[in-house]
Amino acid sequence: MDTIKTISEHRSIRNYKNIPIDDAVLNQILEAASRASTTGNMQVYSIIVTRDPDRKKQLCGYHFGQNMVVQAPVLLTFCADFNRFNQWCRQRDAQPGYDNFLSFTTAAIDAMLAAQNAALAAEALGLGICYLGTTTYNADKLIAFFECPKGVVPITTLVVGYAGENPALTDRLPLKAIVHHEKYEAYSAEKIDELYAEKEALPLTKQLIEENQLDNLAQIFTQKRYSKKDNVYFSKSFLKVIHEQGFMNNEE
Amino acid sequence: MDTIKTISEHRSIRNYKNIPIDDAVLNQILEAASRASTTGNMQVYSIIVTRDPDRKKQLCGYHFGQNMVVQAPVLLTFCADFNRFNQWCRQRDAQPGYDNFLSFTTAAIDAMLAAQNAALAAEALGLGICYLGTTTYNADKLIAFFECPKGVVPITTLVVGYAGENPALTDRLPLKAIVHHEKYEAYSAEKIDELYAEKEALPLTKQLIEENQLDNLAQIFTQKRYSKKDNVYFSKSFLKVIHEQGFMNNEE
C-alpha cells in the first residue's frame, strides 16, 4: 500500500478477529522494524514477541486488563536494550560506558523508531495495530515477566492482528496547533480556544462529558484519564526501573 | 511509493542538493506526522520548522557542526510538549498533573512516533532524511535558541532535503539478534560472536579499525564514537533540562 495512504489511514484497532498471523507476515513486520534509523547503527533495542495464549492472559493484567491483549494474535514489546551491545563490547576488550541516562534515552528512541516502522508495515500488510501506553506504567512487572536482564527496559507494546472493527479516523488538532516556524510561538488564550474549538465541538466530546458528569473535556483528562496521582505513582515506578536496570550511573 | 519498499530502502542521507522543498510537500510531511498514534489523542508534541539560512548556521553549531544541517533546506525539531495541553487544561478549570517524569516519557514517545511518520512520508515523496542524535545532547541550547517554554523538551531532529548522494543500504544485525520469542533469551558468548560476525567482517569495518588504529569495532564505539565521558556529561545535561522544563515534580 502507498506510504502516504498507509500513514493517513491509521486508526488504533481495539477489537480483533480470531485469525493468526502467518510467520512470513510477522517476519516482514520485524524486518521492517529493523530497517528503522538507529543511533550509530548500534541497534540498541529488542523486540519480544508474545503469541502464547496463556502468556497473553498474564500480560493482559499488566496492561490494565484491556481485552484486545488477549484477543489479538501477536503482541510486540519494544525494549530499550544496551545489554546485547554491552556484552559484545566486553567480549572485545572494549569498556562500555552506557550505564547512564543518555544511553537510556538513545535506546528508547531506537525502540520507538523500530516500533513505528513495525506499526506501519503491519498496517500496509492489512493488519490493525494499537499502542499500549501501559508498558512504561508497569515496566517493572514486564521485566520480571519477560526475564529482562540489566540494560533492558520495555518502552512500548504494539498489539497486532486482523481488525474486528472499522472505526472512523480520529480527530486531530489543526496542523498549526503543533507546528512552529523558526521559533516556538507562545499560545495566547484566544489561540488555545481557537485550536481546541473543533475537538470540543465533536459529538463524541459532548457524549464523554455527559457520561463523566464533568464540565468539559480537559477535566476528563485531568480527573479521569491521566490524573496527577497516577502520573506521580508511575513516574516513581518508571524512574526506579531505569535505575535498577542500570541506566542511572551518571558519574564518571 | 509502497510502504514496505519505503521502509526497506531507507538510508540516512548526509549530503543534500541545493533545492528547496515546496510548501505543499512540506505540508504533506507535517500532516503525516500528525496522523501518528498519540497517547490518549493528547498530541503532546510540537514540531519546529527551520528554513532560515542564518538560523540553520547557528543550529549547525549545536549539532556538532555537521554540514548537512546547513546544506539541507529544512530541519524539523520534534519536541515533547505538554505546554499547549497544560494551558488548555488551565483555561478550562482543569488542574493538569503533567509536571512529572511519566508525562515527559509519554510526550517523548509521542514526538518520536510523529518523527518517524514524517521521515517515511518524506522518503516516500522522494526526499532524503537523517536523524540527529545531537538534539538530546544540546537540548539546553536548543531550548534557548527556539525560545521553548516550560513543558517543552527537544527530543530529535530530522534533516530533510533532496539527496545529493546515493549510499548503499546500511548493514543490520540478523533479525534473530534483536527478536526474542515469549521471553528475553540471554545471549551466550558464542551467540554474540555469531550475531556480530557479519558486521565485523565488512570491508567498512576493517577500514574503520585501520583508520582509528584500534583492535576492533567495539573499541571504536567505546573510545571514539560514544565514550563514557561524553555520555556522562550529556546525561547530566539532559536530566537538568528535564528538571528545568518542569518534568521532575514526582511527588503529590
Image (cartoon, coloured by chain):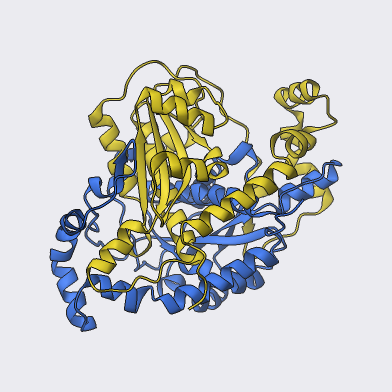
Chain colours: A blue, B yellow
What residue lies at 23% left-to-right and 45% top-to-bottom? A176
Would residue B62 appear left or right of B208 to someone viewing this image?
left
Residue A158 in view of the camera: no
Q: Is residue A249 left or right of residue B28?
A: right
Residue depicted at x 60% and y 67%: A239
- At horizontal 63% and vertical 33% (from top left) the residue drawn is B171
Q: Nearer the viewer, residue A119 or A141?
A: A141
Asked whether residue A90 is in view, the answer is yes
**Residue B231, relative to residue B203: is it above or below?**
below
Q: Position of residue A101 (x, y in %)?
A: 63, 54
- Towards the viewer: B252 or B81: B252
Q: Choose top left, top right, bottom left or bottom right for residue B37.
A: bottom left
Q: Say how many tags the image has.
A: 0
**Left or right: where B59 falls relative to A205:** right
Residue B233's x, y, as percent?
Answer: 67, 46
Quadrant location of the N terminus of chain B?
A: top left
For the residue pair A27 and B9, the one nearer the viewer reads as B9
Residue A111 placement (x, y as % from top left): 55, 51
Q: Identify the image quadrant of residue A190.
A: bottom left
Q: What residue is at 19 percent from the left and 78 percent from the top?
A: A215
- Front one among A76 and B127: B127
**Quick check: A205 above or below B202?**
below
Give residue B208's position: percent from left, percent from top.
74, 24
Q: Residue furthest bottom?
A: A213
Does A26 appear above or below B30? below
User: B42 above or below A125?
Assistant: below
